Image: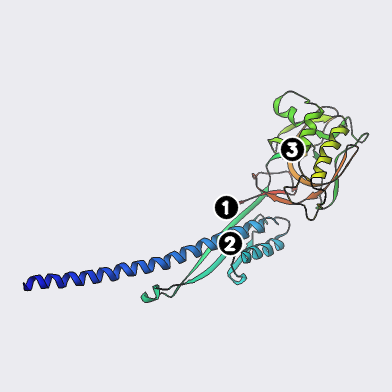
Amino acid sequence: MRQMRSEHGQATVLFAISAVALLSMGALSLDAGRAYVLVQQLKTAADAAALAGGQDLPSNPVQASVDAQATAAANGVQSADVTVSVGQSNQTITVTTTGTVPYYFAPLFGVDSGTFSQTSVVEVGPQSQLQGAVPLGVFEQPFVYGQTYTLKAGAGGGGCGNYMALDLNGSSDGNGDNGASQYETNLEDGYPQTMTIGDGVPTETGDMVGPTDTGLKTRQSSDPNSNYQTVLPTSPRVLYLPIISPSDCGKSSVTILGFAAFYLQSVNGGDVTGQFMHLVVDGQFGSSAGDYGLEAERLIQ
C-alpha cells in the first residue's frame, strides 16, 4: 500500500514537470511565431524598397535611395531602421531593414526581445530581349531623356527608300514583306514575338503613311490625356522599339543594338516623333552597345 502511494506521488511529480515543460514550449512557440511574422514583414519591405529604388538606376542613384526609403516606410519600417546603399556602378541597390519584437514568455529565461534584419539586393541592366515592339527602328546615336526624336520619317523624308520602318514579320517567318495591314497591326498591338540584341531584321521600304497614321493614332486616342511626366509604362503611348545599326538603301538587314522606350508625341503624314524615356521593366539582362534607357531589374538576394 505504501509502495502504491509512493508510485502515485512520483507520477504526480512527473506529470507536473511535463506540464510545465509543455506549457513553456507552447509559450516560447508563441514568441517564435511573432518573430517569424516580423522577419516576413521585414523581408517584404526590403524587397519592395529595393525594387522601387531600382526603378531610378542607373541614371539617378540619389533618387533611388530616396524612393527606397519611402517605400520601406510605406511598408511599416521606420527610416532609422532602413539602410540603403547603391553599388559603385549604379547597377545594384541594397536595402536592409531591421526590427525588434518584444517577447512575452522568453523573459522567463532571460531573453526580453529579438532583433532581426533582412537584406534585399536588386540588380539593373540593359534589356536584352523585347516582346511587343513596334516595327520602327531608331538609328544608334546619343540620347537625352525627355528630348524629342524622329521615330519614323514621313513622306519624302526617307533616305534611299527607307523611312525607319521594320518588316518584323518578314524577319520571323521568312515570307518577306507581309504588307501594310500586318505592319499596321504591329504598330497598334506590338510585335508578338521576342526580339533579342544581335538579331538581324529587314527594313520595310516605302513611306507607309496610311498604316503608320492609323496604327499610331489608335494608340494616341487610347490614352489622350497622358504626358511624358505622368505616362505609365503600360500606356499604349509608350513605344518600345529597337535601336538599330545604319541601313543600306532599299530592302536591307539591320542589326538590333539595344532597346529603348519613347513617349509617342505626334504622328502626322507618316512622320512620327517621340520623347526618349528611362524605364525599368521586367525582362532579361544582356550586354548592349550603349545606354538606351530601357533597363531590366531582378532581385538577386
Chain-order first, disc 2 or disc 1: 2
Q: Is residue 75 left or right of residue 288?
A: left
Please identify, in this view, whether the residue under mark 2 or under mark 1 is nearer the observer. 2
Dots 2 and 3: beta carbons under 8 Å?
no
Specify the quadrant that holds the N terminus. Answer: bottom left
**Residue 190, which numbered label?**
3
Distance from disc 2 to disc 3, alpha carbons, whole Å, reads 34 Å
Q: Is residue 18 left or right of residue 233?
A: left
Which one is in front, 40 or 275? 40
Secondary structure type for disc 2: helix
Chain-order first, disc 2 or disc 3: 2
Dots 1 and 3: beta carbons under 8 Å?
no
Please identify, in this view, whether the residue under mark 1 or under mark 3 is nearer the observer. 3
Q: Amino acid at mark 1?
A: Ile
Mark 2 crowdedness (10 Å alpha carbons): few <14, some 14-19, many ≥20? many
Q: Residue furthest top?
A: 175
Secondary structure type for disc 1: loop
As displayed, is residue 98 above or below residue 192?
below
Residue holding disc 2: 45
Dots 2 and 1: beta carbons under 8 Å?
no
Mark 1 crowdedness (10 Å alpha carbons): few <14, some 14-19, many ≥20? few
Residue holding disc 1: 300
